[in-house]
Image: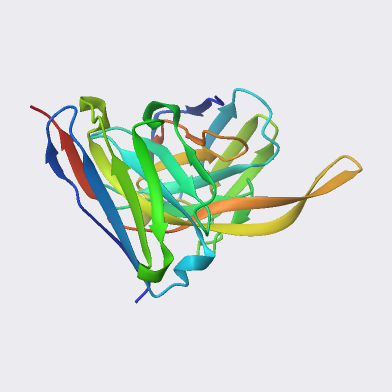
Amino acid sequence: EVQLVESGGGLVQPGGSLRLSCAASGLTFSSYWMSWARQAPGKGLEWVANINQDGTEKYYVDSVKGRFTISRDNAKNSLYLQMNSLRAEDTALYYCANLVADLSRYCSGTSCSSTTYWYFGLWGRGTLVTVSS
Amino acid sequence: DIQMTQSPSSLSASVGDRVTMTCRASQGIRNDVGWYQQKPGKAPKGLIYAASSLQSGVPSRFSGSGSGTEFTLTISSLQPEDFATYYCLQYNSYPWTFGRGTKVEIK
């Protein structure tokens, strides 16, 4: 079965740390960019971080830069999110997802260029992180 | 950062209705937009990417359009399983940003 399964969530005090894991099965994990997204209770979705196939490119939302680190272990088919200096506003359900790249062309008027269209293909069910004293 | 302003925040509709929702980007983002559906207690599900391309397995009653700063998701004939919250996402530049969602409720 093709699936992503997150783990590692829990209750942590402000200023504390937590490491989330995402185990992939049924897909060629090493061939995909991967992402973390989150959703605070009763709120909308927020993109958190992306990592490329070999871990050499990483991107973060500003609110977690310097505190969170995305990483992966392709030998273990696993994605991670190390979260340090946690704040109450980090309380959320954290999802991992794989990114599918569609190599295409974008044309505007008579000008066309190669481009990559992205979409989240598979999502996990999420792991809940609660930051509270 | 690019802001995605989604409207309406909620709408009520009946089965069989045609439903449209919009996302406006704070600057031009070509057609680097996706749409996602989320039902209560479930993970999001992808519907559309590149503003108008259907993800695999998505029913043809879903369609997307737009380019530049204005994007639309249309459900041509609302089905019972379509009552959910819908989010747009821009991936033109980092940080990627979602709209705040449109909740489609039963009238």
| Lateral position of residue A70 relative to residue B49, left or right | left
**In the rendered view, would you say A75 is above or below A15?**
below
Image position, residue A110 (x, y; %): 92, 43
Q: Number of marks in the image? A: 0
Q: Which residue is drawn at 44% across and 27% down?
A: A62
Q: Quadrant of the C terminus of chain B?
A: top left
Q: In which quarter of the image is the N terminus of chain B?
A: top right
| Lateral position of residue A117 relative to residue A78, left or right | right
| Lateral position of residue A42 relative to residue B33, left or right | left
Q: Residue at x 73, y 50 (%)?
A: A115
Q: As rendered, which of B44 and A29 lies closer to the eye?
A: A29
Instruction: Find the residue positioned furthest to the right.
Output: A110
Image position, residue A84 (x, y; %): 27, 35
* Quadrant of the rendered image containing residue A27: bottom left
Q: Which residue is drawn at 33% across and 41% down?
A: A38
| Lateral position of residue A132 relative to residue B107, left or right | left
Image position, residue A96 (x, y; %): 36, 53
Q: Residue at x 56, y 26 (%)?
A: B2
